[in-house]
Image (spheres, rainbow, N blue to C red):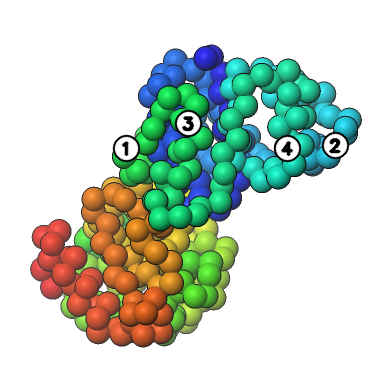
Amino acid sequence: MNRILVVRGGAIGDFILTLPTLKLLRERYSEARIEILGYKHIVALAENRFYAQAVRSIEYAPLARFFAKDAELSPELSDYFGNFDLIISYLYDPDGTFERNLRRCGVEDILVGSAKITGSEHAAVQLARVLKELDLSLTDPRARLFPSREDEEFAMAFHNELVSPVIALHPGSGSEKKTWSISRWQMLAQTLCEKRVGSFLIVGGEADEQEIAAFRSAEFHGSIHIAENLPLPQLAAVLQQCALFVGHDSGISHLAAAVEMPCLLLFGPTDPAIWAPQNPDVRVLRAENGDLLQLEVRVATEAVVQELMRIGINT
């Protein structure tokens, strides 16, 4: 097995939950060239960072023809796919059109994994089922990321502007039901600022514009900084050098856990047994009845203080 392609769409968390599967592949086929076809800003987390030698964007117009029956396929993409000994695809392909078109390119070995998470097993375990045909099974559902030296150098320069210890807060999630209110996040930040435990880093991306704007406009009696729209590999390295991460059930929370940060995650309606990162330093604070509207600032503050004490930071 010399060349392997993994086709993986989905959001940040979806990809990170697939990392244990990629780790199994990497360890079994240590000499193989592994490439990933996905959303490039996300799969960049794996490029030349242990898992894959190259990544390619799934947002490429000629690829659409591969989802049409009897379509004229791009010669360039046909050659690209045809060069792989094995293709593993998580793309939604209910009638098998994508798979048949891959075979038209000369690909013989294709494994189709389901990206839909059902049942009670952890999501990472479900995503790894596709490897059973290779006699591989997942026993460790922890996801790991490996920032490059350049990522780490960026993070060191970034942290030079911050007062240690740094507590990272991510008030977004991409889903209203999974998100604590921004006013409560602000109250949490202010309460922690008053304890003078260090500085605070508010993390956000394009989907978190409202939350970031709310923090920019508020006044806090403490050291608060904002990391907005950082490339994901750099953000992972920045988070790796923080003392604690507090967030929701979100892709950024999976990112923080995957660089082995101590994490306190606020969970609402989603089941942490299925969706929470399985890394040992992750703690989950579950809202009563799965309703984050019922999670009081006092309770969250106490949980953060407990985590800080657990990792050796007095408040």
Read off the residue under disc 2.
Answer: 69
Point out the image quarter for the C terminus.
bottom left
In the rendered view, does 105 fall on the left or right side of 55? right
In the rendered view, does 137 fall on the left or right side of 39? left
Q: Earlier in the sequence, mark 3 or mark 2?
A: 2
Read off the residue under disc 4.
Answer: 96
In the rendering, which numbered label is found on residue 139? 1
- Callout 2 secondary element: loop
Q: Is residue 311 visible?
A: yes
- Residue toward you, 38 or 136: 136
Quadrant in the rendering for residue 85: top right
Q: From the viewer's perspective, is residue 7 above or below residue 279?
A: above
- Callout 4 secondary element: loop
Quadrant in the rendering for residue 163: bottom left
Q: Earlier in the sequence, mark 1 or mark 2?
A: 2
Residue 308: give x, y in percent of width and height: 17, 65
Residue lying at 52% horizontally and 20% vertically, measured from the top left: 33
Q: From the viewer's perspective, is residue 64 above or below residue 285?
A: above
Residue lying at 29% horizontally and 65% vertically, measured from the top left: 284
Residue lying at 57% horizontally and 44% vertically, measured from the top left: 114
